Image (cartoon, helix red, strand yellow):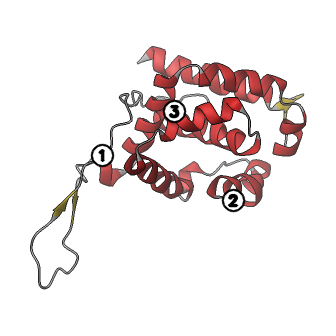
């Protein structure tokens, strides 16, 4: 548990260090103007496919429906049918990260911190199309269409959650106007 907590804190702090200047968070445009450090951090993460898969599993675990045994869809027409449709949730290839209910970086717990790290990775992958971003995408999505659709749908739901939106006014504005629409694209 300590390794999960400390590892996420380290990675998030590295992202903060590479995306800020004199304690001021750089805008996405400013970050992309100097991609060297951010690109190196992305390259290090891209070399760890099990970690990327663990982030994907953590994303799936953030869904109450999936976490609480949501492998059964209710009948389409409740008044005429009483049978449920079962479906399998695709395997990401790695278990989720541990949920440590302690503050992790500036987030309430490790799962929220992991989702924020994943969000930052996806922003950069959308913004910096190169071999590293392609490697991260191919590891995250894989060749499994069911998994890809499930991850995308869950991520879009996660973006709408109140606790996911930054509390800092400047970061919240960038989230609403730039990064969230970029990720949704």
Check residue 131 in the rendering and tell me which mark sits there, or answer none. Answer: none
Looking at the rendered structure, the secondary structure element under dot 3 is: helix
Check residue 67 in the rendering and tell me which mark sits there, or answer none. Answer: 1
Q: Quadrant of residue 106?
A: top right
Disc 2 packing (10 Å; few <14; some 14–19; many ≥20)? few
Q: Which quadrant of the figure contains the C terminus?
A: bottom right
The answer to which of marks 2 and 1 sits earlier in the sequence is: 1
The answer to whether one can see residue 106 in this image is: no
Q: CA distance from mark 3 to mark 1?
A: 22 Å
148 or 99: which is nearer to us? 148
Question: What residue sits 55% from the left and 18% below the top?
Answer: 7
Residue carrying label 2: 181
Question: What residue sits 51% from the left and 30% below the top?
Answer: 52
Across and down, in percent, residue 160 comes to 55, 59
Question: What residue sits 54% from the left and 17% below the top?
Answer: 6
Would residue 114 appear left or right of 179 to someone viewing this image? left
Residue carrying label 3: 139
The answer to which of marks 3 and 2 sits earlier in the sequence is: 3
Number of numbered discs visible in the structure rendering: 3
Disc 1 packing (10 Å; few <14; some 14–19; many ≥20)? few
Q: Marks 1 and 2: in contact by CB < 8 Å?
A: no
Q: CA distance from mark 3 to mark 2?
A: 23 Å
- In the displayed structure, 170 sits above or below 78; it is above
Q: Marks 1 and 3: in contact by CB < 8 Å?
A: no
Looking at the rendered structure, the secondary structure element under dot 1 is: helix
Q: Nearer the viewer, mark 2 or mark 1?
A: 2
- In the displayed structure, 129 sits above or below 83; it is above
Across and down, in percent, residue 116 comes to 59, 39
Looking at the rendered structure, the secondary structure element under dot 2 is: helix
Question: What residue sits 40% from the left and 36% below the top?
Answer: 57
The answer to which of marks 3 and 1 sits earlier in the sequence is: 1
Would residue 29 appear left or right of 86 to someone viewing this image? right
């Amino acid at each position: 548990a300590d390794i999960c907590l400390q590892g996420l804190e380290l990675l998030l702090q590295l992202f903060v260090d590479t995306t800020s200047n004199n304690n001021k968070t750089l805008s996405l445009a400013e970050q992309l103007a100097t991609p060297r450090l951010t690109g190196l951090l992305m390259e290090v993460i891209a070399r760890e496919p099990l970690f990327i898969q663990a982030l994907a599993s953590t994303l799936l675990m953030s869904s109450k429906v999936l976490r609480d045994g949501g492998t059964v869809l209710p009948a389409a027409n409740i008044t005429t049918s009483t049978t449920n449709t079962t479906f399998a949730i695709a395997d990401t290839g790695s278990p989720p990260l541990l949920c440590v209910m302690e503050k992790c970086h500036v987030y309430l717990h490790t799962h929220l911190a992991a989702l924020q790290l994943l969000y930052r990775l996806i922003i950069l992958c959308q913004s910096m199309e190169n071999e590293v971003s392609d490697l991260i995408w191919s590891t995250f999505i894989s060749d499994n269409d069911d998994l890809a659709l499930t991850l995308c749908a869950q991520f879009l739901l996660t973006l709408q959650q109140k606790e996911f939106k930054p509390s800092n006014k400047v970061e919240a504005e960038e989230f609403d106007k730039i990064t969230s629409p970029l990720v949704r694209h």
